[in-house]
Amino acid sequence: MASTVIQSPQFSTLILTLVLLLPSPSLSSDPDPLQDFCIADLQGRISVNGFPCKPASNVTSDDFFFGGLAREGNTNNSFGSSVIQGNVLAFPGLNTLGISMNRLDIAPGGIIPPHSHPRATESGIVIQGQLLVGLITTSGVFYAKNLIAGQMFVIPRGLLHFQLNVGNEKALIYSAFNSHMPGSVYVSVTLFGSRPSVPNDVLKKAFLVNESVIDQIKSKFG
């Protein structure tokens, strides 16, 4: 005959306490790697959180170094800014490591327009120039500060933010992310320059303007 196990209230409380004390899952943007490195095979089929590893026998010293952030970006455009990405697509050695960096060059009066990074928190340091860095919370609260060389900022994951050059010289920022592919969603480009185009009726109602205004803005992102 099977025995009956009677659990006392004290036993149930003990089990609940042990469960609560167990280590919680990592809150990092990307999963922790399970090997020393996994140099991305960019020709392979990407999985949920990274590219397949190229064979260790094909790994060279060059796979651990990247010079793309050394060159100045071209700011001769409508926004007067340039973003050079150092994510896994540009630097395959970052694959599965949960980190990446960008270089931001901003001409006087230029801007990195409002955008968000859906998969990472951003931490940046001003190398040159004077910038107004601002962010907006999900509660609609706006935070901003003028920064000079040597000062840092942090943008929590997913929040809208921008960097505006308010000085008289070129500005340079290096930003770091806790994801090898942080992603960027630019508000203006996404809404007015998508393909296929977002219907005008949606944009008219969203911005409370008439169609001629929407057409005018769309023409700048065509």
Image: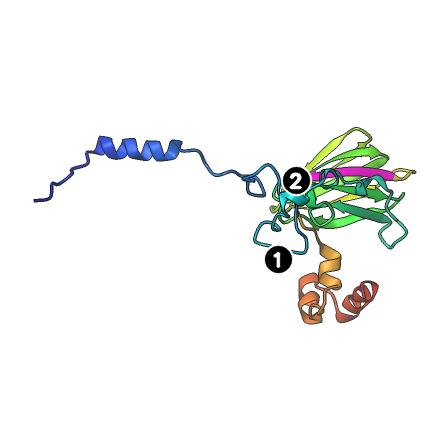
Where residue 64 appears, x then y in whole percent? 71, 38
Q: How is the image coloured?
A: rainbow
Q: Is residue 172 magenta?
A: yes
Earlier in the chain: of badge 2 and badge 1, it is 1
Q: Look at the magenta stretch and give its main secondary structure.
A: strand
What is the quadrant of the C terminus in the image?
A: bottom right
Residue 136 visible from this viewpoint: no
User: What's the amino acid at mark 2?
Assistant: Ile
The region drawn magenta spans: 171-176
Q: Residue at x 79, y 42 (%)?
A: 103
Q: Is residue 74 above or below residue 146?
A: below
Question: In which quadrant of the rendered view does residue 187 lie?
Answer: bottom right
Residue behind mark 2: 99
Q: Secondary structure at mark 1?
A: loop
- Residue at far right of view: 168
Q: Position of residue 146 (x, y in %)?
A: 79, 35
Q: Is residue 160 above or below residue 206?
A: above
Q: Between residues 74 and 205, which one lies in front from this camera angle?
A: 74
Q: Is disc 1 surrounded by few (<14), some (14 to 19) or many (20+) residues within 10 Å?
A: few
Q: Which label sits in the foreground, 2 or 1? A: 1
Task: Give residue 205's position: percent from left, percent from top.
Answer: 67, 66
Query: Would you name the residue on which mark 1 appears?
Result: 45
Q: Is residue 80 left or right of residue 178?
A: right
Residue with the most extreme front position = 57
**Identity of the amino acid at label 1?**
Arg
- Inter-mark Cα distance, 2 to 1: 21 Å
| Left or right for 110, reference 144 | right
Question: In this picture, is 219 found above or below 127?
Answer: below
Given residues 208 and 193, the one toward you in this image is: 193
Residue at 88% over, 48% down: 75
Q: Nearer the viewer, residue 41 or 59?
A: 59
Could you tell me which secondary element the residue under label 2 belongs to?
loop
